[in-house]
Image (cartoon, rainbow, N blue to C red):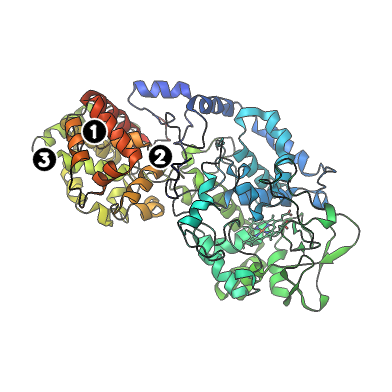
Amino acid sequence: SATTTAFIVPSKPLAFKIPATSSTTALASGCPFSGGVVLPGYPPVKVQEEYADALDKIDWDEVKSDLKSLFSDSKDWWPADYGHYGGLFIRLAWHCTGSYRMSDGRGGCDGGAQRFDPERSWDDNTNLDKARKLLEPIKLKHGLGLSWGDLFVLAGTMSIEDMGGPYLGFCGGRIDMVDNAQTRALGPSPEQEAFAECPVQGDCPAPLGQNTLGLIYVNPEGPMAKPDPQGAADTIRDVFGRMDMDDRENVALIGGGHTFGKAHGASKSSPGDYPYENPANPWDGPKGDGTVTSGFEGAWTAAPTQWDNAYFKNLIDYEWESHMGPGGHYQWRIKGGKGPKAPMAHGEGDQDLMMLTTDIGLVTDPEYKKYVEEFANDPEAFAQAFGEVWYKLVNRDMGPVARCVGPDVAPAQAFQFPLPEKPKKLANMNKVAKDINALLEDSSPDDFIRLATQSANTYRATDYLGGCNGARIRHSPGKDWPANAGLDKTLAQLEGIKESHGDGLSWADLIVLAGNKAAEKLGAPGLPFCPGRTDAPDGDGWKPVEHFNKELPATVKDVVDRYQLRGLSAKEFVALQFPSYSSSAALKAALESSDTSGDVTAEALQFYPELRTWAEYYVASGDKVYGNDFASAWTNFMNADRFDGP
Ligand code: HEB
């Protein structure tokens, strides 16, 4: 729309997982679970609730067996390489999930975003329309509860399992987007050009997750299409790092993926039109052994539909040389025509094995080479490492394990930052509230509001990380962030209350309840409270969200970026200013003030029209509306990260 600029990128909705019925009960007990929030790109709440109900009824065993039958059910319109679609589906799932970026939690397969332009027309996604079309009968058979996002991920995961690879489990519960409001952020877009997010294609910086718009990560041919393996290794380290992957994970992930399937570039013919040009018949190029997808040609191993560690052995056992492949791109072959061959994907005979410059980078870079050797010598270590890193890849944008649905959910993994179990018996929260009120008689409510706000502020709706639950504000890195300076003193003030109520009172609950009582003291209406948070043993869960929380916002753009990332609407954000401007008269004065110097939130209220609109609304509608809207925005905000149920 006309109001869209590069930094106004909407975020995903808050988790909807708790269905309509239980959220009604939750409200009664003071636990207003999210689901009332609808952000751009997602269907209305009512529809999300229908999805959630349908999800409960999915027969996952049947979905899995339908997938297994499809893998070897080759269709004339897109015949399966080697008689198995596994390679194609693994690539589909990897490209859907691999758009995830740590910088702001955007991207990933939650939402099934790859169905929309511009993402579906990325050069890297050539011919993935065929993979989606193959899956369509299963999607239609199982209906609303089976989201495209879940289906893509499950198809890739079951393909690995079906070809003999590791299976750690499946975390379902993705909800499909209904338009491209989210995918636009991943580019390419006119805004990115206008705002120079990526001044040089092939060298795009973070926050972008890739170094070339239109690719998932890096150029397979090497940086700027030069066959430079060390350069390729360096770019892999950089851009896979933006997905929070380390050296060993990179080697396991890339090697595990290229254990399967092949690259398609038998000739220089064009793959055909892009989906945005020809939605009904995109990429209508040659099929079978003539298929052109990426323009590289060949398989990595001699048995491309079978799990093994041959990818690593091949890298080590043979000397590789670069040459110009049939599709007109640099690729690599075994020197002197020696070594194993792969069967043809369709006809008779066989063909030379190949490697991409990025694959060769893994034996060129000394750090990567250590892991190539490890996996070549120890197949079990490889299976373990790949199983784990695949699960991390596909579920990284799903947030805490509590959001996972289905019978095969793996035990909580480190990347999900699991929280301890809830105490069997909660403290008496009315008594805790009394103690807090007593404390507030001679201390400043502002400090307690700031403590609760700074805890809640870390939550981001894009990948469901951060938030109050866990009370990570007590630990590094959060407690050391300049934005949190002085909050140790506020925490210390609460210590007596924490001690006197024992294990039934978590720090996280105490921080939120103290924030509630402080806001009430400033004139807010009675605020509902939903207990049951627990305390993390360390602050690691906040490491991924440090970027947006370490410093206070310095510009209006920062203010806007952050409230959107948190999943707040403009209206909620303005209502949340109540503790600073606790009457509509005070808000009016803030809008009229000629001196906002140093106060970026005040500046944002004045100069960012989407916020000013709501400030004007509260000036006009008066204190009661303003106070009530604060109460509901605050309650949403404090509970945004509660996926654990009441
Ligand atoms: Fe890959 C394929 C590149 C990573 C999985 N790959 C491929 C190709 C290329 C690539 C070029 C071809 C395509 C066509 O068809 O033509 N990759 C690449 C790069 C990287 C990668 C550059 C970074 C370094 N992958 C990866 C990963 C994974 C994968 C990580 C997972 C895990 N791939 C894959 C598969 C395949 C591929 C499975 C096959 C497909 C078929 O078969 O179809």
Q: Amino acid at mark 2?
A: Gly
Can you give x and y, in whole percent of width and height, for residue 80 in the image? 80, 48
Q: Which numbered circle lies on residue 516?
A: 1
Q: Is residue 341 above or below residue 83?
A: below
Residue on which disc 3 sits: 443
Can you give x and y, in whole percent of width and height, for residue 231 in the image? 58, 73
Q: Is label 2 in contact with label 3 (beta carbons under 8 Å)?
A: no
- Looking at the image, which is closer to me, 347 or 616? 616
Q: Amino acid at mark 3?
A: Ser
Q: Is there any visible trace of residue 102 in the rendered image?
A: yes
Question: Does label 3 or label 1 sit earlier along the sequence?
Answer: 3
Q: Is mark 1 within 8 Å of ligand 1?
A: no
Can you give x and y, in whole percent of width and height, for residue 226 in the image? 64, 73
Q: Amino acid at mark 1?
A: Asn
Question: Does label 1 or label 2 sit earlier along the sequence?
Answer: 1
Residue on which disc 2 sits: 567
